[in-house]
Amino acid sequence: MSDLYDGPATVSVRGVERTVRVQLCGRLDPIDGRYHWQGTVYDALPEGTKLPQPATLSVGGSSADARITERPPQGGYSVTGVGSPPFPLPEFALT
């Protein structure tokens, strides 16, 4: 199962913050037991940003360390992270 978030976020690169639109998805990896998430930042990063670049991505009150990895031909920027994501995860009822 994959979790999906599509909406506004704040990206911070080298201390400069920008409000951006992101599309992120993630999953729990059964081998390492960690949550891996990735996606696309659709808006511009601060001028002169060289890739790859560490960043912080925030959605609402949640933040996560991320890595902006590349600029694909389709546009935007690829972003990845491991651990708690910056987007809310759905709650599951255990029965």
Image (spheres, rainbow, N blue to C red):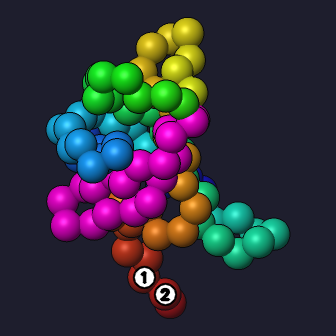
User: In terms of image quadrants, where is residue 58?
Assistant: bottom left
Q: Quadrant of the N terminus?
A: bottom right
Query: Quick one: which residue is furthest to the bottom in this view?
Result: 95
Q: CA distance from mark 1 to mark 2?
A: 4 Å
Closer to the camera, 43 or 5?
Answer: 43
Is 12 placed left or right of 31 in the picture?
Answer: left
**Up/down of 29 relative to 11, above or below:** below
Where is mark 1, residue-wise? 93
Residue 25 showing in the rendered view? no
Q: Residue 34: horizontal and vertical position, in percent?
A: 65, 71
Name the residue rendered at 41%, 49% in the picture. Answer: 55
**Does the magenta run of residues contain 53?**
yes
Q: Residues within 10 Å of mark 2 (few under 14, many from 20)?
A: few
Please state the extent of the stretch shown in magenta in the rendering: 52-69
**Up/down of 87 relative to 15, above or below:** below
Where is mark 2, residue-wise? 94
Name the residue rendered at 18%, 38% in the picture. Answer: 19
**Up/down of 69 relative to 60, above or below:** above
Q: Secondary structure at mark 1?
A: loop
Residue 67 showing in the rendered view? yes
User: In terms of image quadrants, where is residue 41?
Assistant: top left
Is 43 placed left or right of 33 in the picture?
Answer: left
Residue type at mark 1 is Ala
Asked if disc 1 and disc 2 are in contact, CB closer than 8 Å, the reply is yes
Q: Secondary structure at mark 2?
A: loop
Residue type at mark 2 is Leu
Name the residue rendered at 39%, 37% in the picture. Answer: 23
